[in-house]
Image (cartoon, helix red, strand yellow):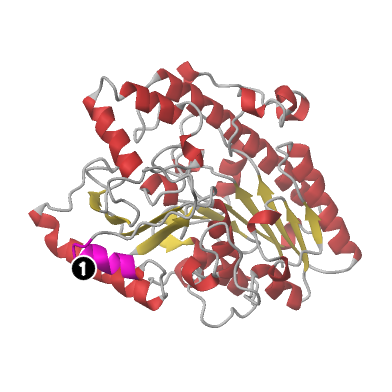
Amino acid sequence: MNLLFITADDMNYSLPGFMGGKYNLTPHLDELAKHSHKFVNNRTVAAICQPSREAMMTGLVPQRSGGLGFTPVYDGTPTLTTILQAHGYFTGCIHKLEHMQPASCFPWDYRVDGTDRNPLVYEEGVKEAMSQARALRKPFFINCNINDPHRPFYGTPQAAGIDHDETGPYKIARELEADDVEAPSFLENLPPIRKEFASYCNSTQRLDVSIGKVLAVLEASPEAGNTVVIFSSDHGMPFPFSKATCYNSGSRTPVLISWPQMGRAKTFEDLTCNIDILPTLLEILQIPSPQHIDGRSWVPLIEGHRQGDRDYVITNINSVSSGMAFPMRAIQNMRYSLFVSLWSDGRLQFNVESMQGLTYKAMRDAAESDARIAARVKQYLYGIPLAFYDLEKDPDQRVNAIDFPEHSKLVAELKQRLLQYMEETNDPQLGNYKILLAGGELVVAGSGSENVR
């Protein structure tokens, strides 16, 4: 079978209709979901673009692949690209080439570079890749990476040059305004935040237009009845308490998978991780997975078996796009999360791309007269070295319950499980974590001079 792997850039789990989104932003994606297996509690192993994409393509956690931040995986690491090429596949990639490195591990036969958000670019790119594969009489693997809804958002001054003032194919049919949306609950219901969130929703609508055009190309082709289709975002939305953090909104990334003769579409609420994507796809394609990978195939789940030894998933943050180091780890089950900020020494201030734009500024300004928002800004800006959240009672992760006596046993268990994970993966922050557990002072060494103390 062929493989079409579609990704979104920074799409939050809560936006698609099939995940409960209420603004009808993704009709094409929702139609795909009707005919796909849905993994609705999937999490990314790293809530930053490059390490997340490299994890999906290798089946390895960042500490073992080398893809810790905006860094390449180790040369010679097997990837979905090299594995499928070795089995006779034609491989094509549209955008995000810079986030899958080194080139020796991602030697695409066909590539379209760039940051364009024109839906026609994806339509034509997929069509051309399929045509070249057909001419060579090879099955195809096409990785179609759509740049929406990444910043700069639809309709903002920063996006005007990139998106040709939202004219022609860059324009969507129904533009939402601030009064049409509510701010996500983990942010604040302030007018500038609603305005920016509406722009983000409009970028998500254009993402869906691109998805619709790509799927239409496949449906019109002779390969439609012999192609696996998978969709995932790399991580959550580029707003505070989401992207580039281990908070719930940053790590949750639902996945859709469909293929001919797969049977009735099902919804799976099991905890899964995006390192599982590579072994899952390879098993569907009946190709052996590399030995010693960290991910596990979902095919047994799909066939009705229970998943053993997957009570928890772990999310990692190391360096961010600026090059600064803000290491975090979170280990969580379906209800509780232990969140470790190994940069939080009370002096270093968090500084990431998600603080650009209207939202963080609005929160910071409101904090001057609102104690509740001031506490939230402090939580984001300075972090909490060790926190524990009850995601059922506190889904927005505002209340640190680390000292609540009713949680002491589970907190101790999660601390130990995280320690074991860091030891097994040779985590570069293992020493710092041991210092934290012992009550010592964290060794904070951001890698850029921009770090603010």
State left or right for residue 109 relative to residue 294.
right
Residue 287: x and y in percent read: 65, 78
Q: Does 449 sit above or below residue 376? A: below
x and y, in percent, of residue 223 in the image: 78, 59
Q: Which residue is mark 1?
A: 413
Answer whether residue 311 is visible to the viewer in this image. Answer: no
Q: Is residue 191 above or below residue 18?
A: above
Is residue 407 covered in magenta? no
Q: Residue furthest right?
A: 135
The quadrant where residue 20 appears: top left
The residue depicted at 59 percent of the width and 78 percent of the height is 289
Question: On the image, which quarter does residue 102 sit in?
Answer: bottom right
Q: Secondary structure at mark 1?
A: helix
| Range covered by the magenta-colored residues | 431-440
- Which class describes the residues within 10 Å of circle 1: few (<14), some (14-19), or many (20+)? few
Horizontal side of 400 relative to 142 (left or right) equals: left
Secondary structure mostly taken by the magenta-highlighted segment of the chain: helix
424, 135: nearer the viewer? 424
